[in-house]
Image (cartoon, helix red, strand yellow):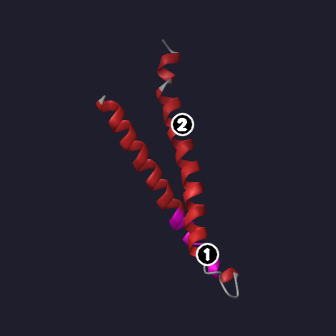
């Protein structure tokens, strides 16, 4: 029971960390310079885009960790 809680906590931390990493990476592109008059919703679009990309990266990372953790079962 306790292992499930720890696993859930690790997954939440990984997902939030990947979203934060993606958000800071997208901010580095300075997208507002691409527009003469940046739309008012550009910050919201950046947040939503970074959430989507961060979630996808975190899902890949978590799936990869789960697959690697099951490899010892192949050698039994």
How many C-alpha atoms fall within 10 Å of the one at disc 2: few (<14), some, or many (≥20)? Answer: few
| Depicted 73 relative to depicted 9: above or below | above
How many C-alpha atoms fall within 10 Å of the one at disc 1: few (<14), some, or many (≥20)? Answer: few
**Label number found at residue 42:** 1
Query: Looking at the image, which is closer to me, 8 or 41?
Result: 41
| Depicted 69 relative to depicted 34: above or below | above
Q: Position of residue 50 (x, y in %)?
A: 56, 61
Magenta residue span = 23-32
| Depicted 68 relative to depicted 26: above or below | above
Secondary structure of the residue carrying numbered label 2: helix
Tell me, yes or no, whether the two marked residues, 1 and 2, touch with CB atoms within 8 Å: no
Task: State the separation of the CA atoms marked 1 and 2.
Answer: 31 Å
Corner quadrant of residue 9: top left
Principal SS element in the magenta part? helix
Query: Looking at the image, which is closer to me, 2 or 14?
Result: 2
* Residue 40 drawn in magenta: no
Q: Earlier in the sequence, mark 1 or mark 2?
A: 1
């Amino acid at each position: 029971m306790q292992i499930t809680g720890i696993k859930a906590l690790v997954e939440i931390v990984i997902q939030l960390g990947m979203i934060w990493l993606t958000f800071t990476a997208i901010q580095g592109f300075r997208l507002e310079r691409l527009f003469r008059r940046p739309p008012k919703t550009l910050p919201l679009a950046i947040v939503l885009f970074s959430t989507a990309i961060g979630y996808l990266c975190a899902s890949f990372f978590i799936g990869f960790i789960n697959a690697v953790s099951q490899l010892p079962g192949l050698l039994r």
